[in-house]
Each structure stands twice: as structure tokens, then as C-alpha cells.
Image (cartoon, helix red, strand yellow):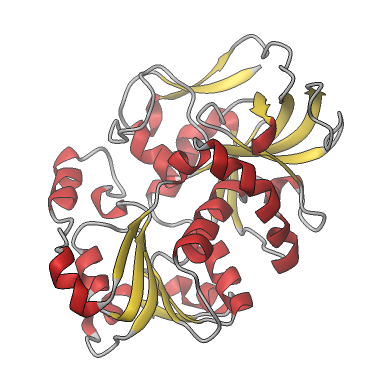
Amino acid sequence: MRQVWLRRSGGPEVLKVEEHSDPSAPGPDEAIVDIHYSGINFADVVMRQGLYREAPPKPFVPGYEGSGIIAAVGSNIKNFKVGDPVVVGSLFGGYSSKLKVPGDLLFKKPSYLTLEESAGLAVNWITAHAAIVDMGRIRAGDRVVIDSATGGVGTIALQMLKCLGAETIGLTSSPSKMDYIKSLGATPMLQDDFNSKTDLKGFDFILNSQGGKTIRQHYDRLGMTGRIVSIGMSAGIGPGGRDLFQFIGAALQMPKFSIIKMFNLNTGVYALNALTLLDDAKYRANLAKSWAEVEHYKLKPHIDSVFPAEKASEAHAHLQSRKAKGKVLISWK
């Protein structure tokens, strides 16, 4: 099989495709999947730069998700068979042409999506679902802001919020992406315009992906019982190369909250890491039940671009440039 390996930190050029032995036979609760497409997430960019605390020691194979066809199944897996098209989650190792997958991270491909489209679903849906449903508890009529609304998580989040009946503002730094946000049922707004309109307050929920000082800025826009969920720190990663000082600067700007002061505000702050959710057996056991909402809402990732696996470095550079709308994939076929 082929895999994209990360053997040292650095720019996109450090990613290299290597040939390795196929996975061994699956255990009773595992399956082997012939991967057609692997999804790239912004967390992959952070770990490539050596700034992701939860990443395993180098060398390792990045990647959290993909789609493909089952090649072998363990004896305890009864709801899948060889030849089934599936969506998979993985705790690293996702940039592989073949992948051994635990049964509880194996999901049926939605009937209305292609394998290509499905590859952009797992991590973005898990993140959006945890933020909007588990933490945010969004209800019809809630006023919501989605930061970085044109990314993979933002694309799925806007679709979910439209179905839930929320009144949503989608933020972007690019005027060319405004129509894209509108097409997903939200009101588009440039981030600079949102920051300047200090009278825009009283929000029930804000999804923050930038981190740094923007968490405090967004927190001050919440209404009574409002919640903010932080899912990353993209403000610490520039569109160019590795910049440790930018990352540290953004980290130092992260606010500290006093519980005493929060009593009168009746507001809440959550932090969300999809990786630790995937590493929790109880949470993973419930994912299969929640997966039905993907079909129910007809959630559909937007695939911005697909790169051959041999050009994984170009795929990373494109995602890091902030030019992508939706999902960036690498293809193994």
C-alpha cells in the first residue's frame, strides 16, 4: 500500500508518499478498507508544522478520515460486508491507500453522495454535530454566528443550522466567498465588518475557529445563556510557512475567564477537540446512532479540490492558503 508520511516538521514539502506492507488481517472488531479518498483537515496542517500537541512522535502518517470500499471484515462486524462503500474515521494514519479501521469508526456511505463527496464528511460532521447539538443545543430561532464559514466544518454547520431553523451569520475574510455562504442559507458577512459592528450582540451561539483574541471578541457578543464553542486556533497559522512566533502570539492572546464574573452574564465557553472525541469509546459508540442525521438532513460536503496522493504537499499548501471553499482531498485511485 501507499501512505503519506510525515518524518519531520516543516512546510508542505516534507510530506512524502512511501510504499509499505498492507495491513495485517482485521481483528474481530475491525475492517480493512480500500481507501479511495482521504480528507485533509486544518489540524493536519498544524501537526505538520510541529505545533499539534496530541500528534504522535514522528515519523507517522497523518489523517483522520476517508472513504472507500471494504476489503475484509472481522467476525464481530455484522452490519457491513466486503464490497460495501463506507466512510471511515481514524486516529491518525488516514493518508493511506489501505486502512485498518475499528468497527465503531466505520459508517455507511450516504446514499445520495459519491465516494469523493463522502470523504469530506466524517471529521467535519463529528465536529459540527458536537458543537451544534451536544454543546450548543441549538433550537429554532436561535441567533448564531459561524466563524470561517466556508471551511469544511463551516459548510456542514451552515447546512445543519438551516435545517434546525437558526438565524445564522456566516463569516469570511474573502468577498469572493460571500455568495457561497448565502447559498448555504446563512447571511454572509466579512469578518472585518462583523468586528466593526459592535452593536451586533445578543447571540445565542458562536462557533469560533480562529482562537487567540477573537474568542474574547466573540464572547462579548453573546446574549444571556449564550454559548461560544472554540474548535481551533487558525489565527496562529499563517498562509505561508511555519511561524512559531505567530502561533505563540495567538496562544498568549487566548483569554482567561473568571467564573465569578461569568455568574452575572449567564454565558458559557466550550473548547472542542474532535480527536479526543474519536478517542473516547463511549462517544464513539453513540456516533453510529447519530449518523442517521446525515441522511435526514441530506448534509453534503463541498469538495473544493482533489489532489493525487503524490501531490499531498500541494493539497496542504492549498488548504493553508485559505483559498479553499469546503473540503480538500487526496485521491489514491
Q: Report how many numbered discs are placed on residues in the image.
A: 0
Residue 80: x and y in percent read 83, 35
Q: Is residue 307 visible?
A: no
Decide which of 42, 88 is in the foreground and name it. 88
Q: Quadrant of the N terminus?
A: top right
Who's the residue at 37% across and 18% down the image?
58
Asked if residue 45 lies left or right of residue 80, the reply is: left
**Residue, x 29% and y 87% (percent of image)?**
200
Residue ranking furthest to the bottom: 199
Picture coordinates of residue 280 (x, y %)? Answer: 50, 38
Q: Measured along the vertical axis of the image, is residue 255 above or below residue 54?
A: below
What residue is at 33 percent from the left and 20 percent from the top? Answer: 8
In the displayed structure image, the side of residue 47 where residue 277 appears, left or right:
right
Residue drawn at x 48%, y 43% is: 277
In the image, residue 52 lies at what x, y percent? Answer: 32, 35
Q: Quadrant of residue 37?
A: top right
Q: Is residue 111 above or below residue 101?
A: below
Q: Quick check: can you spot residue 91?
A: yes
Quadrant containing the C terminus is top right
Q: Is residue 67 above or below residue 102?
A: below
State the image coordinates of residue 103 (x, y, percent, origin top left).
Answer: 70, 32
